Amino acid sequence: MSSNTFSQGAQVEHQKFGLGTVMSSSEERIVIKFDDHGEKKFVTNMVMSSLKKSDRPAPAEKRGSRKRKTAPATA
């Protein structure tokens, strides 16, 4: 992997889309999951000037909450 690509899991900041996490990266393509804009795919060479490394910790994945079923009251 070249020095101009970010490793998987790296935290980055994009000028337009804000903070995100690198999902995958290669010489040709980079996939970033942004906090507020979802997953975006870019041509690596074209997006590198718009990205900078972020020092923030990776966000915790949100887990869906489920309502518990309550047993009917017995009289």
Image (spheres, rainbow, N blue to C red):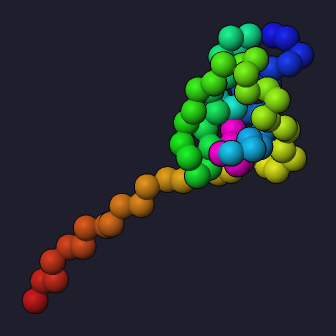
Residue 64, image quadrant: bottom left
Q: Nearer the viewer, residue 41 or 60?
A: 41
In the rendered structure, the answer to whether residue 48 lies left or right of residue 43 reads right
Residue 20, image quadrant: top right
In the rendered structure, the answer to whether residue 7 lies left or right of residue 62 reads right
Residue 23, image quadrant: top right
Residue 27 horizontal/vertical position (percent): 74, 10
Magenta-drawn segment:
17-21
Q: Is residue 42 above or below residue 75?
A: above
Number of numbered callouts drawn:
0
Instruction: List the single residue furthest toward the bottom.
Output: 75
Magenta part, dominant SS? strand
Q: Quadrant of the C terminus?
A: bottom left
Instruction: List the single residue furthest toward the left.
Output: 75
Q: Nearer the viewer, residue 73 or 5?
A: 5
Q: Is residue 46 above or below residue 36?
A: above
Name the residue located 65 percent from the left edge and 45 percent from the top edge: 17
Residue 41 horizontal/vertical position (percent): 58, 26
Name the residue located 33 percent from the left edge and 66 percent from the top edge: 67
In the rendered structure, the answer to whether residue 22 lies left or right of residue 65 reads right
Name the residue located 68 percent from the left edge and 45 percent from the top edge: 16
In the rendered structure, the answer to whether residue 7 lies left or right of residue 24 reads right
Residue 66 horizontal/vertical position (percent): 36, 61
Q: Is residue 61 visible?
A: no
- 2 magenta-colored: no
Q: Is residue 55 above or below residue 47?
A: below
Q: Quadrant of the N terminus?
A: top right
Residue 52 horizontal/vertical position (percent): 84, 38
Q: Is residue 74 visible?
A: yes
